[in-house]
């Protein structure tokens, strides 16, 4: 099977995108792993599959597969790349798009150049919604891991996130603590872990160890989760510039019950074919 693809990225968080709007396409976990392999495949953090919408209100339905072959619920950088792809390929019906995922809908505004603004939905803090095993909601949780205890904030941005406050992201134990939390038994569906350094109320630095992908250069839902938790802790203002290893995202959140807005770039890298 020979498939056409488009390679894209959002701040270095990279994707292989397949267009299945005109013909059905099913990807098995072993095929996803081969595509994502940076030595024997195309190489990416996630594979995106664009399909026809499941209802008349949306422009497309899209699926997200991590490099390990697992399918996940949401991806902030991915949704921007899907929107940019639809505009570049002439499939966007205007500057406002509605993109469906397994977890709901994302409303997207295409701005000038490569900038895309996304309504990422309202953060959910109830443990059952994340999901996270805790007797009741709290702003902070102590969790036993690696023979010690760490304090986290927990939130769902359509996918589960743990957020840790650190003094310096460059010295944070991302590659050791990230994998330990990823499959921690208190997170039944795994978790993305964000290591947050607050520079001042309007600026933060962030590294994210993503479930099923490892550390990426940027994580859109992770940036939204970090700002939501930082505001819950009273440490961040409404609009925050979040610096990730691949660049900057602008994140804005008013209050609980309101959506988080994310603005950042989406770039096309190249097109090609792969035989599966």
Image (cartoon, rainbow, N blue to C red):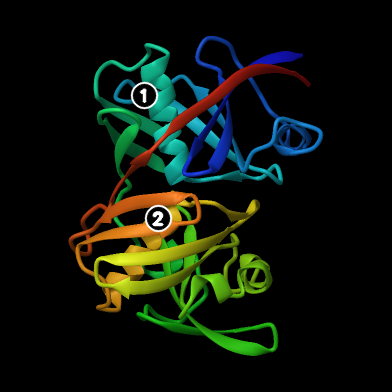
Which x, y percent locates residue 12? 53, 43
Q: Position of residue 107 (x, y in %)?
A: 29, 36
Residue at horizontal 33 percent and vertical 25 percent from the top: 58
Q: Earlier in the sequence, mark 1 or mark 2?
A: 1
Q: Is 55 in front, or is 201?
A: 201
| Quadrant (top left, top right, bottom left, bottom right) of the C terminus | top right
Would you say the residues marked 1 and 2 are in contact, meaning their CB atoms lie under 8 Å apart? no
Q: Quadrant of the N terminus?
A: top right
Judge from the rendering whether residue 103 lies leftward or rightward of residue 201; answer left or right. Answer: right
Which mark is on residue 157?
A: 2
The image's mark for residue 6 is none
Above or below 89: residue 66: below
Residue 180 in the image: above or below residue 254: below
The mark closer to the camera, 1 or 2, is 2
Q: Which element carries disc 2, helix, strand or loop?
A: loop
Q: Which residue is mark 1?
A: 55
Q: Is residue 253 above or below residue 220?
A: below
Q: Position of residue 253 (x, y in %)?
A: 23, 58
Disc 1 to disc 2, how far (Cα)?
A: 22 Å
């Amino acid at each position: 099977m020979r498939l056409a693809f488009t390679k894209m990225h959002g701040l270095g968080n990279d994707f292989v995108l397949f267009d299945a709007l005109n013909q059905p396409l099913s990807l098995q976990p072993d095929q996803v792993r081969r595509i994502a392999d940076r030595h024997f495949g195309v190489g990416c953090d996630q594979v995106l599959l664009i399909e026809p919408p499941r209802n008349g209100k949306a422009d497309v339905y899209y699926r997200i597969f991590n490099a390990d072959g697992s399918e996940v619920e949401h991806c902030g950088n991915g949704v921007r790349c899907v929107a940019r792809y639809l505009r570049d390929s002439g499939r966007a019906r205007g500057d406002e798009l509605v993109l469906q995922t397994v977890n709901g809908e994302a409303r997207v505004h295409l701005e000038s150049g490569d900038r895309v603004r996304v309504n990422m939905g309202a953060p959910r803090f109830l443990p059952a919604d994340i999901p996270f095993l805790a007797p009741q909601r709290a702003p902070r949780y102590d969790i036993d891991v690696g023979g010690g205890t760490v304090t986290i904030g927990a939130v769902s941005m359509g996918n589960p996130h743990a957020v840790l406050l650190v003094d310096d992201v460059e010295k944070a134990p991302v590659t050791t603590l990230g994998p330990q939390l990823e499959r921690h038994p208190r997170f039944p569906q795994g978790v993305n872990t964000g290591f947050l350094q607050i520079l001042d109320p309007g600026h933060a630095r962030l590294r994210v160890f993503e479930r099923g992908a490892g550390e990426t250069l940027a994580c859109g839902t992770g940036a939204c989760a970090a700002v939501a938790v930082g505001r819950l802790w009273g440490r961040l203002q409404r609009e925050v510039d979040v610096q990730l290893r691949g660049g900057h995202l602008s994140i804005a959140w008013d209050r609980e019950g309101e959506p988080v807005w994310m603005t950042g770039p989406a770039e096309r890298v190249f097109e090609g074919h792969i035989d599966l």
